[in-house]
Image (cartoon, rainbow, N blue to C red):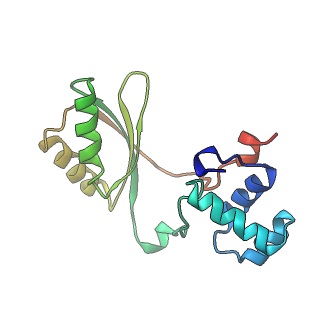
Amino acid sequence: MSPIGLKLDAIDMRILSELQRNGRMTNVLLADAVGLSPSPCLQRVKRMEQAGYILGYGAQVALPRLGETVTVFTEITLTGHTREYFQRFEQALRKVDEAMECHLVSGGYDYLVKFVTRGLPHYQETIEGLLERNIGIAKYFSYIVLRTPILKTELPLETLFGE
């Protein structure tokens, strides 16, 4: 079956869930956790990697241990609403290291962007830099995160896609 037509079954979903919890687990431990022998488990993982279901593996970093930062969610409204405006804005924002997430949303504004900066002055420099680039920002509203009581890094795959 081609990667485009790849259908995931319940075992594939369990593999994805386990890898979300611990992307560094050995194939033997993964196989045991999902009830397979190592060889078929590894084949499934490789198949899902090739098909684009697994995009990569990474470490969760304890940001507060590295130093003080501030997280700011910013609502951004563009001056125009054509494809060219959206493309210009998104292309420019991709080059901003502090922009961690960008969501095109419906409602009273166009984008919700999550920034992580060294502090408020750094955030202000970042947003002013975007404004100076003349990429079509009409207005923005900033929401400073005071604390994050819930932060999930694992998607509830079996809840979303289970049978």
Left or right: 157 as drawn, with respect to 66: right
**Image position, residue 125 (x, y; %):** 20, 53
Q: Is residue 32 above or below residue 127?
A: below
Horizontal and vertical percent for residue 86? 28, 33
Kindly tell me whether residue 96 is visible in this rendering: yes
Which image quadrant: the C terminus? Answer: top right
Q: Position of residue 103 (x, y in %)?
A: 42, 38
Q: Is residue 14 left or right of residue 110?
A: right
Tell me which residue sits at (54%, 70%) in the image: 59
Q: How many marks?
A: 0
The image quadrant of residue 26 is: bottom right
Residue that extends furthest to the front in the rendered view of this protein: 1
- Determine whether, in the image, residue 59 is placed left or right of residue 154: left
| Quadrant of residue 11 within the rendered picture | bottom right
Indicate the quadrant where residue 67 lies. Answer: bottom left
Q: Is residue 139 visible?
A: no
Residue at x 62% of width, y 53% of height? 152
Residue found at x 71% / y 40%: 160
Does 105 sit above or below residue 161? above
Front-most of residues 146 and 48: 48
Query: Residue sitting at 71 percent across and 70 percent down?
Result: 42
Q: Position of residue 77 (x, y in %)?
A: 29, 29
> In this orientation, which residue lies closer to the viewer: 54 or 64?
54
Closer to the camera in the image, 16 or 123: 16
Looking at the image, residue 95 lies above or below residue 144:
below
72 displayed left or right of 16? left
